[in-house]
Every structure is written in C-alpha cells, then in structure tokens.
Amino acid sequence: MIASAGAFSAMSALVKLTCDGLPVGEIVLARGVVTLALSWLAVRKLAAPWGLDRRRLAQRGLLGFCGLTCYYIALSRLPLAEATTLHFTTPLLTAVLAWRLLGERLRWPGIVALLLGFAGVLTISQPAALLRASGLDGLGVSVALVGAGFSALAYVSVRRLTAREDPRVIVFYFPLIATPLALPWALWDFVVPDLSQLAALLGIGVTTQLGQLWLTRGLALERAGTATAVGYVQVAFAMSWGLLLFEEPLVTTTVAGVTMIGLSLLAIALSRQASAAPP
C-alpha cells in the first residue's frame, strides 16, 4: 500500500504539471488508454482474462471511474488543500463500509491509525476555508464528498473481488470501463498535446497502472479500512514532489502532519501484530 501511495503521488504530480495545458477529460482518457493497453498485456495469457464474476468486476470499474471523475472535477473547482482534505475522507468511509458490508472489524490500533492519519492530513492541508465554512464552491464540496464515497465503495469492491479474482484482472476492468466513458468528455474539448505533454500522459498511465496493481494486492492482504489508511502516506510523498518540482516551501505544520502520518503507520503495524497474535 505504501508503494501504491508513492505511485499515485507521482501520478498526481504529473497531472498537476499537465493540467494547465490539457483539459481534465483528455488526461482521464489518456490515463485510461495507457492503463488499458498495459492491463491487456498483463491478462491476455491468463486462463480467465475476463474474470469469473464479470458483473462485480464491471461494477468495480464503474465505481472507480465515478470516484476519479468526481475527484478531478473537485480539483477544478476547489483549492488543492480543500480538495485533498475532502478526498482523504475515503479511508474513513472505507472502514465504515467494510465493517457494514464485509463484516471487517477494526481493532483499536487501526481506529487510532485512521483518526491520526486524517488529523495529519488536516494539519498539512490547513483547510481554513473549509473549517470556516465560507468561500468554497458548494458544488465542488459536494462532488468531492460524493467522489470519496465512490472511491470507498470501489475499495470495498476490490477487497471482495480479491477472494476469487486475479489482481491483474481486477485492475484491467478499471480502464476497460473508464476509457469508453471518458471518450465523449475528452472529445468535447480536445487539445493536441506536444511531445512533453505526451510523455507526461504516458507517465500518468504507467504510474496509475503500478498504483492500481499494488493497491489491489494490498487490499488482498489486509483489511480494507486498515489498508486504505496507509494511503495517508501519499500526502508525505506529495510534499516531497512539491519541494522538488514546484518549489513549495516546507513549513512547520507540514512536518508535524507528516510526523502524525508516520505515527499512524506505526499504529497500523501494531494493529497487524494484534491481529496475528493468538487469542
């Protein structure tokens, strides 16, 4: 899950570099085309490349596309800090949904990890406008929260599918569903990319593919709520990209937030030890 967070943070950095020159729909389509090609190469020689439970696989792909679309729309309507904070309600929602739908029970270290990690995200993003409930686009906030819900449902769906399906097949269905759905959106405002933008789009697709594959494997090995809580470390990775690529300053609140996220990872490790211990 940490590797997945690293890959997704690299993807986000590439999206930030690209979105000034290309429409969001075009980025979503390019991401889908690249990951679809890579996924097909990974599954074409499997005994069941189209999977066993195709209805649930298609459902997972649709949920993932809806979550991605809502997140990108929120990014276009909200400040980055507020959009990020709302997006990282996903692990909290995933833990609740996994408890209700999968019967997964979080031990106290896992609960501490969820809350501490989210507190770290709040500390880093400093969503002052969100806390004052003023100056934010109402539609953007609503779409961001709906997107977090879709993403949480997608994670629970992946967790359920990993009991029967090959992780590569689960990953394959995301671009299989998302690419045709993104096509009309991209064609509505298409811009011909230059070579540097093409390279960035390819990088977005590759990092997405790696992130999805590692995410799926992580959800196969760990409870959904605990596994997605590890994704909070993506904020720390994003801070590193901000320093390296965008010359964003390192402030005290960022260091404090990253420390809290690190402590949340320690709590997750303790949770795994508690789960492995004999009763």
Image: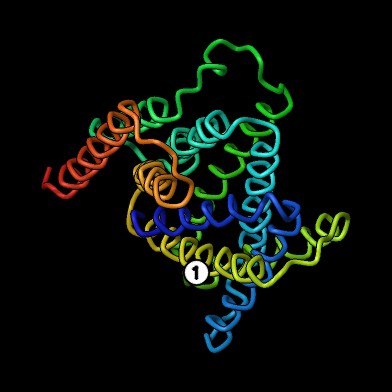
Question: Is 168 drawn above or below residue 17 in the view shown?
Answer: below
Can you see residue 228?
no
Report crowding for label 1: few under 14, some 14 to 19, many 20 or more residues within 10 A (C-alpha). some
Q: Nearer the viewer, residue 124 or 138?
A: 124
Q: Quadrant of the C terminus?
A: top left
Q: Nearer the viewer, residue 56 or 180?
A: 180
Question: Is 86 drawn above or below residue 193 in the view shown?
Answer: above
Can you give x and y, in whole percent of width and height, for residue 182 in the image? 77, 58
Residue sitting at x 47%, y 57%? 10
For badge 1, the amino acid type reads Glu
Residue sitting at x 41%, y 53%? 5
Can you give x and y, in whole percent of width and height, for residue 113 in the image? 29, 34
Q: Quadrant of the N terminus?
A: bottom left
Q: Which residue is mark 1?
A: 165
Left or right: where does residue 15 sit relative to residue 102?
Answer: right
Q: Which quadrant holds residue 262?
A: top left
Can you give x and y, in whole percent of width and height, for residue 250 in the image? 35, 35
Q: Secondary structure at mark 1?
A: loop
Residue sitting at x 44%, y 45%? 242
Left or right: where does residue 60 sit relative to residue 23?
Answer: left
Total tally of numbered discs in the picture: 1
Residue placed farthest to the right in the image?
188
Can you give x and y, in whole percent of width and height, for residue 234 in the image? 40, 46
Q: Which quadrant holds residue 203?
A: bottom right
Residue sitting at x 30%, y 36%? 258
Can you see residue 242?
yes
